[in-house]
Image (tube, rainbow, N blue to C red):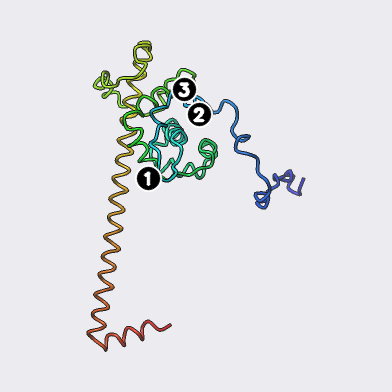
């Protein structure tokens, strides 16, 4: 104890240089039964022939099963934006393990979602989330669902195994369908905002180039202005 009668504080060892030493594998860092493992296992058991059947030729591309797992786990993890999923693939060990340390960018993820998965994502996401709910890994109440839209889409979705589900599962599927509508709407809005921002930056760059050209023309037309500018520009 010190003079004031307080116990001496003991800190755990802290040394950032240890990060340069061999690190444990990602496999060992994901505990058994973790949600990301369950998502991966459920997807591994699905029939994905239509999704993984790509036409041959061209340059190599990311494996569709990896992209599917990253996208579906992102949705389950409430990371609905392709930009957030891209960030997680670089920073979150669960996503890094799921992707095998591959890091597709948000454009690749978005194109996969709106292209290869366009007519299939509802079936796949619904099957995965339904099994996770029934296995008590997640609760549907944890996700934002607009209840006013549930009845309006009750007959919109046709699932490959719809005739085999119970009434309770049917209600869950309807709610999951509404949730996916909301997820896709948020992603579309995110893409639109990104496009607007990009266009705004391009306009700013164009305006800057115009100003530089105008300044150069003025300097060429007025030698006095040119000399004054050069004097001001000297260090």
Give the numbered dot on residue 40.
Answer: 2
Quadrant where the image shows the N terminus: top right
Name the residue carrying label 3: 132
Q: Are marks 3 and 1 in contact (CB under 8 Å)?
A: no
Name the residue carrying label 1: 107
Quadrant where the image shows the C terminus: bottom left
Which percent across, then down, holds residue 156?
Answer: 26, 21
Residue 217 falls in which quadrant of the image? bottom left
On screen, residue 101 versus residue 219, left or right, reads right
Q: Is residue 15 above or below residue 112?
A: below
Q: Nearer the viewer, residue 163 or 211?
A: 163
Q: Are marks 2 and 1 in contact (CB under 8 Å)?
A: no
Residue displayed at 29% across by 67% down: 208
Q: Is residue 161 above or below residue 9?
A: above
**Circle nearer the N terminus (2, 1):** 2
Tell me how far mark 2 sits from mark 1, CA to CA.
Answer: 22 Å
On screen, residue 232 versus residue 91, left or right, reads left
**Circle nearer the N terminus (3, 1):** 1
Helix, strand or loop for disc 1: helix
Residue displayed at 34% across by 12% down: 163
Residue displayed at 30% across by 63% down: 205
């Amino acid at each position: 104890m010190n003079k004031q009668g307080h116990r001496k504080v003991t800190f755990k060892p802290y040394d950032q240089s240890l990060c340069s030493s061999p690190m444990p594998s990602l496999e060992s860092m994901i505990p058994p039964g973790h949600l990301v493992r369950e998502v991966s296992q459920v997807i591994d058991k699905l029939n994905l022939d239509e999704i993984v059947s790509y036409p041959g030729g061209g340059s190599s591309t990311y494996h569709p099963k990896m992209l599917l797992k990253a996208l579906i786990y992102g949705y389950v993890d409430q990371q609905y934006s392709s930009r957030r999923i891209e960030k997680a693939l670089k920073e979150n060990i669960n996503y890094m393990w799921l992707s095998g340390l591959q890091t597709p960018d948000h454009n690749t993820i978005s194109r996969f979602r709106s292209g290869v998965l366009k007519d299939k994502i509802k079936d796949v996401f619904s099957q995965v989330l339904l099994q996770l709910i029934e296995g008590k890994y997640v609760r549907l109440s944890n996700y934002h669902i607009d209840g006013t839209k549930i009845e309006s889409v009750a007959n919109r979705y046709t699932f490959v195994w719809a005739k085999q589900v119970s009434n309770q599962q049917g209600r869950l599927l309807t709610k999951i369908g509404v949730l996916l509508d909301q997820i896709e709407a948020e992603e579309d809005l995110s893409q639109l905002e990104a496009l607007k921002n990009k266009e705004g930056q391009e306009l700013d760059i164009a305006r800057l180039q115009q100003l530089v050209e105008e300044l150069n023309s003025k300097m060429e037309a007025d030698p006095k202005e040119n000399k004054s500018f050069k004097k001001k520009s000297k260090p």
